[in-house]
Amino acid sequence: MSLLEVKDLQVRVEEREILHGLSLNVNPGEVHAIMGPNGSGKSTLSHVIAGKPGYEVTGGQILFRGEDLLEMDPNERAAKGVFLAFQYPVEIPGVTTWNFLHAALNAQRKARGEDEISSPAFLKKVREVAKSLNIPQDMLKRGVNVGFSGGEKKRNEILQMALFEPAVCILDEMDSGLDIDALRIAADGVNALRSPERAMVVITHYQRLLNYIVPDVVHVMSKGRVVKSGGKELALELEESGYAQFEDAA
Amino acid sequence: MNVVAKTETGRALGDAFAAARDRLPGKGKIAEQRREAFEAYERLGLPHRRIEDWKYTDLRALMREVLPLAPAPDAAALGRAADAVKLRAIDGVRRLVLVDGAFAPELSDLGTPEEGLSIRPLREVLDAGDGALSAQAFASDISNPMIALNGAMATDGVVIEIANGAVLAQPLHIVHVASGTAPASTFTRSLLRLGRDTGVTLVESYLAGEGAKAYQTHDGLVVAIGDNARLDHVRLVEDAVDAFNISSATVSLGAHAHFNTFSLTSGGHVSRYQLTITCAGEGSKVETNGVNLINGKQHADTTLFMDHAVPHCASREIFRAVVDDRAHSVFQGRIIVRPDAQKTDAKMMTRALLLSDDAEADNKPELEIFADDVTCGHGATTGALDQSLLFYMRARGLPEKEAQALLIQAFVGEAIETIASDALREVAIAAAQRWLQARA
Ligand SMILES: Nc1ncnc2c1ncn2[C@@H]1O[C@H](COP(=O)(O)OP(=O)(O)OP(=O)(O)O)[C@@H](O)[C@H]1O
Ligand SMILES: [Mg+2]
């Protein structure tokens, strides 16, 4: 069974249709890349999968391990193993990163019927992950993303992904705002999480990221649809020729 | 509108006052003051919305009548009170308990006081005829009808004096407990006098015993902070959901004195806290902070009057209201800077968070500045929880209520942070968390 199955998805925002029948099939262990021009609907797709309010699904389905994802609250989806690394992570003043992550991890565990993780055990775990991603400890004591640089926010997303160990990870432009070294560290972090059970959907504008995180499948999105799918060489092709050839297809 | 007193309830209360007069401590001048205070109350009656200061808190509509005096607590009442006190006990404090308006020595910690500390029940002070102290306890302005009524009817309270130079390590904790199973009113008045170069922390809590019904707590606190003295004050209103709490505090500061006060209201059906602070000595500093956490049909009003009478004083107000369901939060903050009060530095910031469409928050800041060389400002905002933050948190696995709770804690945290003592900050956080948990 596929892990994540998007079938003929149609989505509207404020009376305007943004996704016009999008399909995507992601199996365990696969890495999919989604590329496409600005405004083609990539973030919209990621938001709808994560359950962001404000989108009206007018047709189609999203199945996660065969279950109807659209029926679930965002927190239920997270507990089941859906993770979205945001293109624009928000700042949450007054809520320390440390506290937030502990509460979130325990909420997920509770939802799955697992025991809560104690503060010392959590501390140990989060420290290890932070170290592997080159994230300084004192960032964990600050408000979530408050005063973080663009690159630090992105690394904090990868940190959460590593901590929650989700089944499907959607990375929305994780490479934007990262310098070359940070990109390599973050990509290493993502690669470390690759496993036969886990799938990744990597949204990016740049082929460079895909040198680090090598995809099994590349999709081109245009105007709310997947207009072409292929192997990793498709990304190189796009780098050469741009999206113009797909505009008509869409 | 001045002649409302002769309503049914006005007459009933008049009779109640006549009947209670003999039970009320204090003869001679005090008895005289009580009668004047009662007459002042009777002329105005329960305040209503056409009186500017009570525009948002119409007691005539919300409270309708003042209930008769609660009987003195019997053994069963003291037992219920003891349970309530135990449930909210704070470690390391000296506890002073008032049950149904009467000082309860059996529930209080009267063990050897620290050097320079004197504690006596108000009743004892009045009975002993201590003129100066009694006069100070009853000196409040009776133009405010609820302060007048409180003065007229006060049955007991705590009189605390701190001798010059005494800095007390142990906080004092005045606990007001309503234990009555039949609706009634309690009237208490307390006095706290800090001498020169003193320091103390005072905590006040308002609680209900099991089964306490629709009671009314009328409390008054008079505080004089001497030169170079510091008072830290934490107040927690956790009354029963159908209770009324009408409290007033009148505070004056001497030169280079420091007053840090924090009030949290999560209980009670209708509450009004009237805080009047006068900077009477140069170089004094005031931090007034508060949090309302209310839901259901609760109504919580904080009315602050900050009086800068002399130069070189500073005041800061941080007030946060979290309002759910059909609850109504009111913050009125009036700052007056009198002509002599040059170099005053006064700032007030109030923010309200509305958790439902029917929730209401009224903010009425007023600055009246009569001096020219001052720094004054105020700001007020009202808003809802940020949906994009909530979604981010939920996408990480937090159920909606839990995500809201973290954001609410952060929101009120800015006010709670101002509490100087780590231990008492934790006490305030625990009170906020009780509210959040009850909501979850
Ligand atoms: N809340 C909204 N209200 C109105 N229009 C919206 C809303 N959210 C998205 N859109 C529109 O939907 C379209 C797709 O936006 P989306 O953010 O999904 O694009 P994207 O492919 O992620 O673009 P980028 O590469 O720039 O990140 C855009 O035209 C955008 O303006
Ligand atoms: Mg996008």
Image (tube, grey):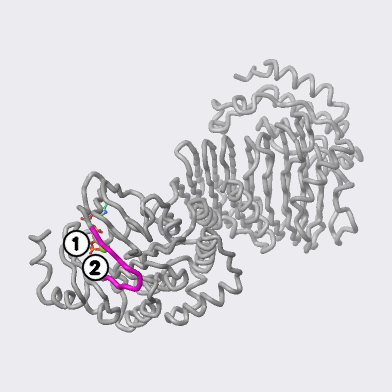
The numbered mark 2 sits on a residue in which chain?
A
Location of ligand 1 given as a quarter of the image: bottom left
At which x and y percent is residue A44? 28, 57
Q: Is residue B78 above or below residue B349?
A: above
Residue denoted by label 2: A34
Residue A195 located left or right of residue A17: right
Question: Which corner quadrant of the image does residue A5 belong to?
Answer: bottom left
Residue B151 located left or right of residue A167: right
Q: Quadrant of the C terminus of chain A?
A: bottom left
Can residue A168 be seen here? The reply is: yes
Q: Quadrant of the N terminus of chain A?
A: bottom left
Q: Is mark 2 within 8 Å of ligand 1?
A: no
Q: Magenta part of the protein: which range?
A: A23-32
Q: Is residue A64 above or below residue B327?
A: below
Asked which secondary structure carries label 2, the reply is strand
Residue A136 located left or right of residue B276: left
At which x and y percent is residue B234? 68, 53
Viewer-closest of A225 and B423: A225
Query: Residue farthest to the right?
Result: B128
Q: Does residue B175 show up magenta in the picture?
A: no
Residue denoted by label 1: A226
Can residue B282 be seen here? The reply is: no
